[in-house]
Amino acid sequence: MKKIGVAILGLGVVGSGTYKILTEHREFYKRTQDIDISVESVLELRKERALALGIAPCAIAESMAEICSNPEIDIVVEVMGGVEPAKSFVLSALRAGKSVVTSNKELFCKYSHELEKAAKKNNCGLYYEASCVGGVPVIRSLLDNLQGNKILSIMGIINGTTNFILTRMTEKGASYREVLKEAQLLGYAEADSTADVEGYDAAYKLSILSSLAFHTKIPYTEIYREGISKVNQTDISYAHKLGYTIKLLAIGKCGGNGIEVRVHPSLIKSEHPLASVKDSYNAVFVTGDSVQDVMLYGRGAGALPTGSAIVGDIIYCATHPVARYSTFKNTEKADAATKFVTNFESAYYLRLSASDKAGVLSKITSILSKNGISVDQVIQDKERVDGKVPIILVTHVTKENNVKKAVADINAVDNVASVDSIIRVVS
Ligand code: HSE
């Protein structure tokens, strides 16, 4: 029976989950995979974490060098998070001829070109299923099962913290601040929640997923990013009246004009499958030219779901002697030939505060029409706020730049109306 030795770098939530799965399923993998996978070593500064899991003191490494020089270790699992020291540790493992399995989306998104180069040079595997959407097998699906397709679009809820916050705001009427606190207490959001709520975490994941989907490097710096910190009850409730739910969506499209990649709050029809993805669940909706629509759904975070993705990679690595790398030239920057679309085509939700007097609505619609924007739905509420009435418009599909220009024109007309909220509508 093939023996595979593993080292785990970091025994936080994901590292501990991975350790538990590997130890509890060891006999099962011997029987089903014909491999004996043993955790030979761990690297964790807080040794009490290792001891609490029942790891023998002699298996707690003192340094990365100790792991690199241990001939019993074939695969290094990096679940520390952050860029450094994770990057140096992963590079030293690859240079020592060890394959690497990582859950680190920030590291992989920013430095996969360097890591992959080192992996290829040393003939090692480099696997990262756990970096995106936790236990949901989206990377392997893109890298293997969906290879027969030209992927046209990928759209998903790929951050659990923001989905939890938006679900609670929608269902309980709670404020953004209140739910953010709850998410932090439940351990979903980080103490510094910026990466989650401002969309960086989703942008890192979209960079990885869209590069795989569209076979070209899409650096996260090319992704338009907007978080959920400005989403409020007023917009959630008007969206509901109009038949929509607000979600933080990550969207990638590959069409004749180029590649479009964006992360932002979106109104999505309440009957769309992604609208029913609630709490900290994640889902990815992929459209391929042959397969058409595929939706993958599940837990995007957590000890055992993310551990499941890591152990899946360990088994894949142990059973595939020829490593699987990117299908595109993995460079730091986007290929010069890749065109990015920034003047998106979308429908828009606009909430305005307007003076309640004759001619105001016609002034607004004439500005919209002058900018090539046609209105699909409109609500004018009776309730006055600071002497103004709210007007809510949903436009037909138009170009982003038309909307920016129209909003500037509306805001420039004194005492008529101001645009308080702009949210893209996904059809
Ligand atoms: N902070 C991430 C989320 C965890 O909320 O989805 C998994 O990447």
Image: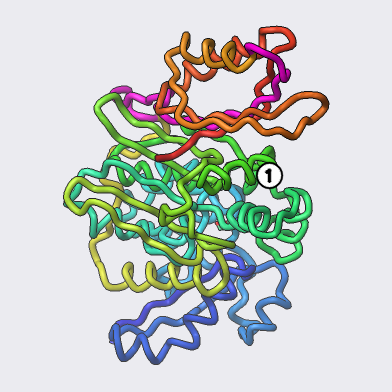
Residue 95 appears in the figure = no
Q: In the picture provided, is 422 more to the left or to the right than 126? A: right
Question: At x 17% / y 50%, what residue is drawn?
Answer: 290
Please rate how many residues cluster around mark 1, counting C-alpha atoms within 10 Å: few if below 14, some from 14 to 19, many from 20. Answer: some
Q: How was the colour assigned to the protein in this rendering?
A: rainbow
Q: Quadrant of residue 312?
A: bottom left
**Residue 316 percent location from the top left of the image:** 31, 69
**Residue 360 percent location from the top left of the image:** 64, 14
Question: At x 59% / y 33%, what residue is drawn?
Answer: 379
Q: In the picture provided, is 292 more to the left or to the right than 185? A: left
Residue 185 magenta: no
Q: Please, what is the three-letter code of the amino acid marked with disc 1?
A: Thr
- Regarding mark 1 in the picture, which secondary structure is present there? helix
Residue 290 appears in the figure = yes
Q: Which residue carries the number 1 mark?
A: 194
Residue projecting furthest to the right: 386
Q: Quadrant of residue 226?
A: top right
Magenta region: 334-359
Report the magenta stretch's main SS: loop
Q: In the picture provided, is 117 more to the left or to the right than 93? A: left
Q: Quadrant of ligand 1?
A: bottom right
Q: Nearer the viewer, residue 321 or 354?
A: 354
Q: Nearer the viewer, residue 214 or 251?
A: 251
Question: At x 63% / y 30%, what residue is drawn?
Answer: 380
Quadrant where the C terminus is found in the figure:
top left
- Vertical placement of 322 versus 349: above or below? below
